[in-house]
Image (cartoon, rainbow, N blue to C red):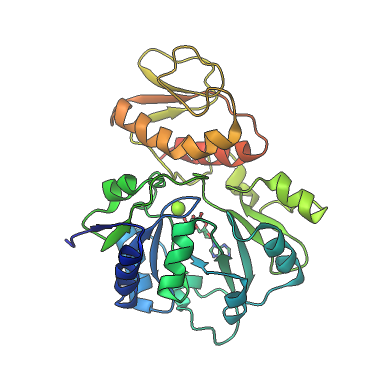
């Protein structure tokens, strides 16, 4: 057991967090999407301890967080497609998969031995100040135990990882509330790898062309989804009314709903509230309980919300 310190997002707290990272420790860090579990991306042992703290069964590749576009070239090749996307959407909730640069200082655990690397320049002021204070690349998956609901507050991080990480920087709730959208920009043809906090329609509009679908299409087939973001109890989707005993989470007008993603039916508000609602519904329903979500339109951020809900409801 480690004592997990709660740090303030002020210069003293950020300097303390940066010192922990330089010493090979783990610090949970707020970003506009979700809280990330940060380690020095050049330190093999520190990166390995991310997987240990999360209880991740496999070494999935991790996202490298950088302060700005200027440092990207140290670690990756900025393809022409990536340069356009970066100009349009960085800093922000977009991750680009790029060709890995030979001789980059990144730990091979970060890329899981691939010849590509996922890079993100976050917009959240605390994340940016922390990247500056640390002065190097930060590897960070979401700061939750593997397979559990993503954290969008420091308390969520502590609920899942207290005693397993060195510190969390508490900067309140995440503004976007959904993980970043991931686009493969290694070639000239943009491919969507994960729907997330930046709407696919916005990317397609900026590029003037559609994104290719994820190459592994089986992942979108219901029933084949890896269970992820899971509450303890049973979860039912597209529920236009609750069944007896269910905690019903509404969207738009839903008379009698215990919780709501957005009473006015706003998808941006719903995205910001999604993981709060999953955590709160999980607490209300309990381990044996049942949760039902109202239908969410499958457009804009609704696509990412529905993706997370399908994974949360997948059999496990
Ligand atoms: O918003 C976010 O993206 C958050 C915050 C903390 O930045 N991070 C996050 O990380 O969601 P994580 O580890 O939960 O998800 C990273 C995703 C994984 O699905 C992984 O497979 C993909 O990024 N990924 C990383 N490197 C990749 C690569 N070289 N090629 C393809 N996918 C990659
Ligand atoms: Mg995650």
Instruction: Say which of 136 and 106 sits in front.
Output: 136
Q: Residue at x 38, y 55 (%)?
A: 143
- Residue 136 in picture, x, y percent from top left: 46, 76
All told, the count of numbered labels is 0
- Residue 197 in picture, x, y percent from top left: 58, 47
Q: Which residue extends farthest right?
A: 208
- Residue 92 in picture, x, y percent from top left: 59, 56
- Residue 187 in picture, x, y percent from top left: 74, 69
Q: Is 41 above or below relative to 60?
A: below
Q: Is 35 above or below relative to 303?
A: below
Q: Quadrant of the N terminus?
A: bottom left
Q: Quadrant of residue 21?
A: bottom left
Q: Quadrant of the C terminus?
A: top left
Q: Which residue extends farthest front?
A: 11
Instruction: Say which of 115 and 226 sits in front.
Output: 115
Instruction: Say which of 8 and 80 sits in front.
Output: 8
Q: Is 151 above or below relative to 77?
A: above
Q: Residue at x 61, y 36 (%)?
A: 302
Q: Quadrant of residue 140?
A: bottom left
Residue 41 appears in the picture as rendered: yes
Residue 314 appears in the picture as rendered: no
Instruction: Say which of 85 and 310 sits in front.
Output: 85
Q: Residue at x 41, y 45 (%)?
A: 152
């Amino acid at each position: 057991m480690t004592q997990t310190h709660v740090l303030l997002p002020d210069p003293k707290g950020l300097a303390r967090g940066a010192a922990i990272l330089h010493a090979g420790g783990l610090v949970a860090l707020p970003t506009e999407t979700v809280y990330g579990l940060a380690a020095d991306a050049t330190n093999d042992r520190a990166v390995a301890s991310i997987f240990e703290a999360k209880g991740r069964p496999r070494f999935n590749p991790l996202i490298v967080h950088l302060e700005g576009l200027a440092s990207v070239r140290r670690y990756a090749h900025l393809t022409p497609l990536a340069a356009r996307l970066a100009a349009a959407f960085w800093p922000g909730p977009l991750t680009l998969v790029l060709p890995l640069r030979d001789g980059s200082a990144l730990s091979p655990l970060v890329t899981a031995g691939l010849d590509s690397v996922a890079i993100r320049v976050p917009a959240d002021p605390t994340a940016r100040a922390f990247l500056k204070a640390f002065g190097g690349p930060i590897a960070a998956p979401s700061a939750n135990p593997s397979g559990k609901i993503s954290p969008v507050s420091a308390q969520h991080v502590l609920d899942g990882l207290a005693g397993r990480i060195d510190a969390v920087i508490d900067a309140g709730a995440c503004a976007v509330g959904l993980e970043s959208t991931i686009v493969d920009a290694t070639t000239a043809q943009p491919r969507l790898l994960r729907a997330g906090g930046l709407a696919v329609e916005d990317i397609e509009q900026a590029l003037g062309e559609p994104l290719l679908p994820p190459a592994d299409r089986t992942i979108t087939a219901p029933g084949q989804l890896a269970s992820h973001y899971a509450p303890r109890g049973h979860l039912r989707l597209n529920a236009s009314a609750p069944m007896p005993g269910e905690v019903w989470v509404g969207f738009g007008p839903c008379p009698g709903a215990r919780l709501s993603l957005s009473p006015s039916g706003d998808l941006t508000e719903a995205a910001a509230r999604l993981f709060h609602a999953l955590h709160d519904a999980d607490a209300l329903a309990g381990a044996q309980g049942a949760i039902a979500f109202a239908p969410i339109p499958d457009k804009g951020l609704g696509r990412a919300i529905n993706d997370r809900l399908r994974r949360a409801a997948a059999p496990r």
